[in-house]
């Protein structure tokens, strides 16, 4: 599928108004970010007077930006070599002022002739969202961000003082968490809640549901701001799937709800827990397609070390109401669920590219609806105790091999993205796949941090 829905372009008058507002707000530098295939956020920055140029014609970027690896190697492919250049254009319609003299905008890759680059993850999600909407399907996506704070040298916070979900853990970091809440609020990133998680030094912040592209942008910005606030408090933040061996992993759970012509698909129907026929088919499509798409959701060299039974990371390709060991947890429409029914995809981790993970879950849901997929039986217990439960691919190699064979992945993401994804992940696997989880956790603790 080509990228069909172009980035909105500001008129000259809108440009001038933007520039005046940025200057009024004391902005000196505009940061434009892209998330690459390895899940790392890369950036170009310009002085604020160059904001228009960043938007209209863009800044130069080698096509290899998409195949930079977590160790900063470049995983050249037969499509991506040393020749050629792309333009990185900031989407100023999504611009936010973020304090400290900075503004931020997500950027997209274009060719030098001004066409959307087929390898651009954000451009891809824009098109996937537009195609779903054109087919009458509206999605809302809510992200959870788990992250682990460390001291300024990258060492764990003291284990003996940590209490899972503890008040003490929150009060110990009270200033940082309060700054986080106000910084995100000021940047219009809608925080739903913020709490201490299970693992030592681990916290979680969840964001309100939004349209898929906006929700993915919010994750990118939130990760930037969490890094910035942590630095101000003399700490570092890890978004690694496994920050410390033996401790809890960091997930990046994705909540999805769907509606057709304004009516919800995951509630109000006659299926289990009120699923409509199409809602049940969407859930079935996600459950069926997960093993082949896992390389998009949790494909890094550290992903398999997190995605194990017993860690609430969703290591089994099954669904269940409020089942925290199922990769697909259904949250039904109850008075206790003000955002309405949704499914939570738990297997996703923060080494994934959030734009591509969103494309993938939407594609699986649509695929299920289109082929009227039958909802498999619900798993009502811990799937580890159910011999019929299907475990998701348990190694990086298995996840990548499955992805390579996925027609749905190629159809939704395109060959450029799939080949680039496989190239960076296979580089990880070849170079580091033989290392112990402890050594890997240490080596790549900050690979996905901003
Ligand atoms: N930290 C777990 C993970 O790796 C998730 C815990 C939870 O259910 O919030 O996904
Ligand atoms: Mg959590």
Image (spheres, rainbow, N blue to C red):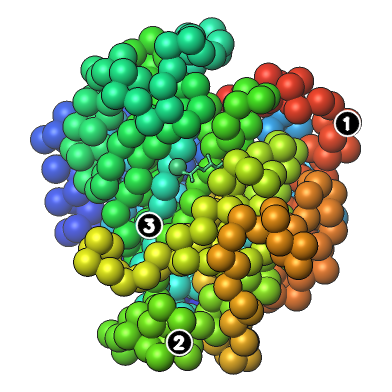
Residue that badge 1 annotates: 434
Picture disc at residue 311: none
Residue that badge 3 annotates: 142
Q: Earlier in the sequence, mark 2 or mark 1?
A: 2
User: Closest to the observer: 37 or 30?
Assistant: 37
> Could you say where residue 38 lies in the image, as x and y percent from the top left?
65, 43
Residue that badge 2 annotates: 271
Q: Which of marks 3 and 2 is nearer the N terminus?
A: 3
Q: Earlier in the sequence, mark 1 or mark 3?
A: 3
Q: Residue furthest left?
A: 24
**Marks 3 & 2, CB-CB < 8 Å contact:** no
> Could you say where residue 319 lies in the image, as x and y percent from the top left?
57, 67
Q: Is mark 2 on a helix, strand or loop?
A: loop
* Image position of 363 (left or right of 158): right
* Image position of 152 (left or right of 228): right
Q: Distance between the residues labelled 1 and 3?
A: 35 Å
Quarter residue 270 falls in: bottom left
Q: How far apart are marks 2 and 1 (CA)?
A: 46 Å
């Amino acid at each position: 599928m080509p990228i069909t829905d172009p980035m909105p372009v500001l008129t000259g008058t809108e440009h001038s108004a933007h520039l005046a507002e940025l200057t009024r707000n004391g902005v000196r530098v505009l940061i434009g970010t892209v998330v690459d295939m390895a899940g790392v956020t890369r950036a170009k920055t310009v002085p604020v007077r160059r904001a228009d140029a960043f938007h209209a014609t863009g800044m130069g970027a080698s096509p290899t930006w998409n195949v930079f690896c977590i160790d900063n190697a470049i995983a050249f492919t037969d499509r991506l070599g040393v020749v050629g250049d792309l333009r990185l254009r900031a989407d100023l319609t999504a611009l936010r002022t973020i304090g400290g003299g900075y503004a931020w905008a997500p950027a997209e890759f274009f060719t030098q002739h001004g066409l959307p680059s087929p390898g651009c993850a954000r451009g891809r999600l824009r098109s996937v969202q537009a195609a779903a909407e054109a087919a009458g399907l509206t999605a809302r996506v809510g992200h959870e961000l788990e992250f682990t704070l460390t001291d300024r040298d990258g060492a764990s916070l003291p284990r003996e003082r940590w209490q899972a979900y503890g008040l003490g853990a929150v009060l110990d970091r009270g200033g940082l968490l309060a700054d986080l809440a106000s910084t995100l609020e000021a940047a219009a990133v809608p925080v739903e809640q913020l709490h201490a998680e299970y693992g030592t030094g681990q916290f979680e912040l969840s964001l309100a549901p939004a349209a898929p592209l906006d929700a993915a942008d919010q994750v990118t910005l939130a990760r930037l701001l969490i890094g910035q606030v942590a630095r101000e408090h003399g700490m570092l933040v890890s978004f690694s799937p496994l920050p410390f061996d033996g401790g809890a992993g960091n997930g990046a759970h994705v909540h999805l709800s769907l509606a057709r012509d304004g009516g919800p698909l995951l509630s109000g129907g006659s299926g289990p827990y009120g699923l409509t026929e199409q809602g049940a088919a969407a859930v079935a499509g996600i459950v069926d397609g997960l093993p082949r798409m896992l390389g998009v959701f949790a494909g890094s060299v550290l992903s398999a070390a997190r995605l194990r039974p017993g860690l609430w990371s969703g290591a089994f390709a099954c669904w269940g109401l409020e089942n925290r060991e199922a990769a697909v947890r259904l949250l039904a429409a109850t008075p206790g669920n003000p955002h309405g029914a949704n499914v939570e995809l738990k297997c996703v981790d923060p080494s994934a590219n959030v734009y591509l993970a969103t494309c993938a879950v939407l594609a699986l849901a649509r695929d299920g609806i289109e082929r009227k997929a039958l909802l498999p039986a619900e798993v009502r217990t811990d799937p580890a105790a159910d011999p019929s439960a299907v475990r998701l691919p348990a190694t990086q190699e298995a996840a990548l091999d499955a992805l390579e064979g996925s027609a749905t992945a190629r159809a939704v993401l395109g060959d450029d993205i799939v080949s680039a994804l496989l190239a960076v992940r296979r580089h990880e696997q070849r170079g580091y796949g033989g290392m112990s989880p402890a050594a890997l956790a240490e080596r790549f603790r900050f690979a996905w941090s901003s």
